[in-house]
Amino acid sequence: MAGRVAVRAGEAYPVEVGCGLDVGALAAAALEVGDCALLTDSTVGPLYAGRVRRSLRAAGWRVLETVEVPAGEGSKSLAVYGEVLRRLARAGLMRDGALFALGGGVVGDLGGFVAASYMRGISLVMLPTTLLAMVDSSVGGKTGLDLPEGKNLVGAFLQPRLVAADLGFLESLPRRELSMGLAEVVKMGLLAGGRLFGALQRLAEALAGDARALEELVLLSVSFKAGVVAEDERERGRRAILNYGHTVGHGLEAASGYGLAHGEAVAAGMVAEALLSRRVFGTDLVGLHERLLREAGLPVRVRGLEAAEVLGAMRRDKKRRGGEHRFVLLREVGRPVWGVEVGEEEALSAVEAVLEAA
């Protein structure tokens, strides 16, 4: 059981999807074998770093260093970033080396920015271990760090040379983490329509860990995202549709002090933005959103946050222009519209609708 998607952005690269992937051999086919380093976190490292190192060495790679950072969003910081750079420098990794990022979205975002900036750029291989990273953050070249003032305010674009999405990694993933990834799958199904939207009928199977359902949803999601990225690599136009649910979602995350999980924030964000879509376009997709998200095991409301704080965080959103909030909204399934300007009162009303009292 395996599949491949070609991402045609910058230098085209493959996304390999399957179980029991030979990372070392796949990487050897994608770039020149040589020195490398492995970046992982304190949750994933003890489970899988040894296996990945053995695969790399069997294919001829020289693993100079394994850097393990604390698990969690806190590692997307300037302090952790600086420490990783110093570890690579002390290990002697040079400009012709490669960095393998083994982990979820945090490791991918951090590793991507390290690879983009270390010695002005080294090769990057993404080894996503969460469903969210497989279907979204490992593909497309966005990297980023957080600041106290907001999420992903520091970063760069760097396309990886290879993404190897081994579905076997998902076997150790808690059910809640599977739900986090399914939030992005639901998002892409609503944006894409067609076959991917139809495949959302397998959400319950995927949540139960069915390998074939997961493979289908991962491959279709990656294929859709690859097409969007190929058309607009630097997010100057259509790629902005991938931010659906994220304008409110990032505001919810920031207002919670990043205690709210990304997938749960995006789920509530999509419901809020479906409400805005109904007000702007008159199409009522709110019930559809809530049904799909519940099938994916996700909440559609958030407890314990103040709407004013969420709105304050949204004012620092990178997509904001000229004092107006800019949203991706749905005219209907498969017909997203980006750059829709919404005033403060309408935005506040949508946020309030997805908040519950503590």
Image (cartoon, rainbow, N blue to C red):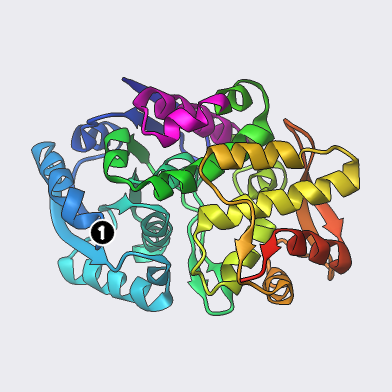
Q: Which residues are magenta?
A: 201-228
The kind of secondary structure element at disc 1 is loop
> Is residue 50 part of the magenta span, yes or no?
no
Amino acid type shown at disc 1? Thr
Tell me the residue at 57%/31% (across/down). 224
Reply above or below: 273 against 26: below
Q: Position of residue 218 (x, y in %)?
A: 45, 32
Q: Name the residue beneath numbered marker 1.
A: 43
Give the quarter of the figure containing the C terminus. Answer: bottom right
Q: Position of residue 310 (x, y in %)?
A: 68, 71
Tell me the residue at 55%/37% (across/down). 295
Observer-nearest of 32 and 229: 229
Residue farthest to the front?
358
Position of residue 89 in the picture relative to residue 343 (left or right)? left
Can residue 6 be spotted in the picture? no
Can residue 27 be spotted in the picture? yes
Give the quarter of the figure containing the N terminus. Answer: top left
Position of residue 265 in the picture relative to residue 38 (left or right)? right
Tell me the residue at 73%/54% (across/down). 272
> Is residue 225 part of the magenta span, yes or no?
yes
Magenta span dominant secondary structure: helix
Picture quadrant of residue 190: top right
Q: Position of residue 98 (x, y in %)?
A: 27, 51
Reply above or below: 12 against 267: above
Count the labels in the image.
1
